[in-house]
Image: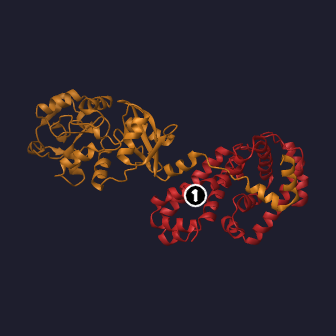
Chain colours: A orange, B red
Amino acid sequence: MTTMTTITTARDSDAALEAALHGLRSTAPANVGFGALVGAGLADRYAPIDTPLGTAFVAWNGRGVSWVGQATDGPAFEARFRADVGRAIAPGDAVPPRLASAIARRLAGDRRAHIPLDLRGHTPFEVMVWLKALEIPRGEVRPYGWIAAEIGRPRAVRAVGSALAHNPVPLVVPCHRVVRSDGFIGQYSMGGPEAKRRVLGSEGLDTSRLEAEAAAGIRFTGSDTTHIVCNPTCRDARRVTERHRVTFPSLAAAAHAGYRPCKHCRPVSLAA
Amino acid sequence: MDADAALAQRLARDVDAAFPGLVEAHQDRLYTIALRLLGDGRDAEEVAQDALVRAFRAMRGYQRERIAALRLRPWLASIAVNLARNRRRRADDRQPPGQLEPMLDAGFDLATDRRAGPEHRAARRETQAELAHALLELTPAVRAAIVLRHVDGLSLAETAEALGRPEGTIKAQVHRGLRELRVVLDAAPPPPIRQRTPARAARLQPALEAIR
């Protein structure tokens, strides 16, 4: 059969034309189906991003950012993602512009930048811990006990630590801004205490001073002009000049000296 | 119970679990519908994917009974047709008519092709390219009726449901579409791919007006 006869028959009868129309069916390229699963949040894509810890990979789907992690390369990241999350994943061209700019603004300290997060499969407690960590400003830290108190579970300090260790989206949810109550920098899923110091340093925090003061027993600082007591890294506390800066080993000691807690950083009594 | 009704039952029980089956069963036809309505493969990919995601989100907001009662073929087709229409309107806003010459997707992948030799495949491709071009000469409403009824193969009732028009209207539009396609195919010689000119459209116009 030649082109001409096909067209001629198509012209001759409705049936032939209808058959030719039916022959216009096509097969969808593979990314249509996978893209639909990603849009539905049943599969993910990922791409590399620049972070203070070097290149990391970020995974996302139609519901939001689902995973952030370090890996030697893409396939290693995919393997970790599949083992941990259990969904299919494939490389994406790049992080979608809206997510990418929100992540960049967040990492730069803009807490108004809204990053949709896909935190399905985690406990409500874990999600509460992570959302609370999102409130800690860039360049500041809070003790684990602060998160526990803020979410209304003051005795669940260990559970807070465990939830932060399982943060699926480190850097995006800044679990690095939560430190041990004694001021020691604490563990970090993205490469231990040294990596944690590096990220905090990149955010403008003097970690040597933080750790030195913690070692010296300083837990809170205040101003003798305002009589307000803060977490040591609170932006209000850092504005106080050395001449007016006072330090306290506990909130009780501060209260005894007539200091009231800062309304911005909301310091809490820390369990012994 | 046909395959779609069974799929709707599975979706009613668990949208997340059954959605991959819906993607598998309907992605090719949604891509085809978008491709034949818009004439551009990239646009068609996005419309097909978007239609599937919108269907998913809609179903997550539906009661079980409503999902179970969905007639998936016309319902999904209506989503794709609406998305294609919106996309075409946006494109029309961006570019004045006449410059907007739809590119033709050259990727045909038909089971029947594999049986035949290269010559036959080439011949078929040429015919299909002409027919695909001819479809794009139809008015959007008539094109949608023809694509759903004869490319996708929906029944008259399903096409009417998908397009939200009475069956009588669809019947008339399909009839008119077939006649117009014949006029366009008769206007020789066919244009090379991507070379459709406003001049050709102008030449065809009187012939199409005459039968409209």
Q: Position of residue B174 (x, y in %)?
A: 78, 63
Q: In the figure, is residue B52 to the left or right of A111? A: right
**Closer to the camera, B72 or B163?**
B72
Q: Position of residue B104 (x, y in %)?
A: 73, 44
Q: Is residue A231 above or below residue A194?
A: below
**Closer to the camera, B26 or B117?**
B117
| Residue A185 in which image quadrant | top left
Q: In the figure, is residue A147 to the left or right of B88? A: left
As drawn, which residue projects farthest toward the top? A208
Q: Residue at x 75, y 44 (%)?
A: B121
Count how many numbered circles sit on residues in the image: 1
Query: Can the viewer see residue B39 in this picture?
Result: no
Q: Residue at x 67, y 53 (%)?
A: B32
Q: Residue at x 82, y 58 (%)?
A: A16
Determine crowd level at label 1: few under 14, some 14-19, many 20+ residues with C-alpha closer than 10 A: some
| SS for dot 1 | helix
**Closer to the camera, B9 or B140?**
B9
Per the image, the residue denoted by label 1 is B25
Query: Can the viewer see residue B152 in this picture?
Result: yes
Q: Position of residue A93 (x, y in %)?
A: 52, 37
**Closer to the camera, B80 or A155?**
B80
Q: Chain of mark 1?
A: B
Q: In the figure, is residue A202 to the left or right of B45? A: left
| Residue B191 in which image quadrant | top right
Query: Quarter holding the C terminus of chain A?
Result: top left
Q: Position of residue A41 (x, y in %)?
A: 46, 52
Q: Residue at x 37, y 40 (%)?
A: A80
Mark 1: amino acid: Ala
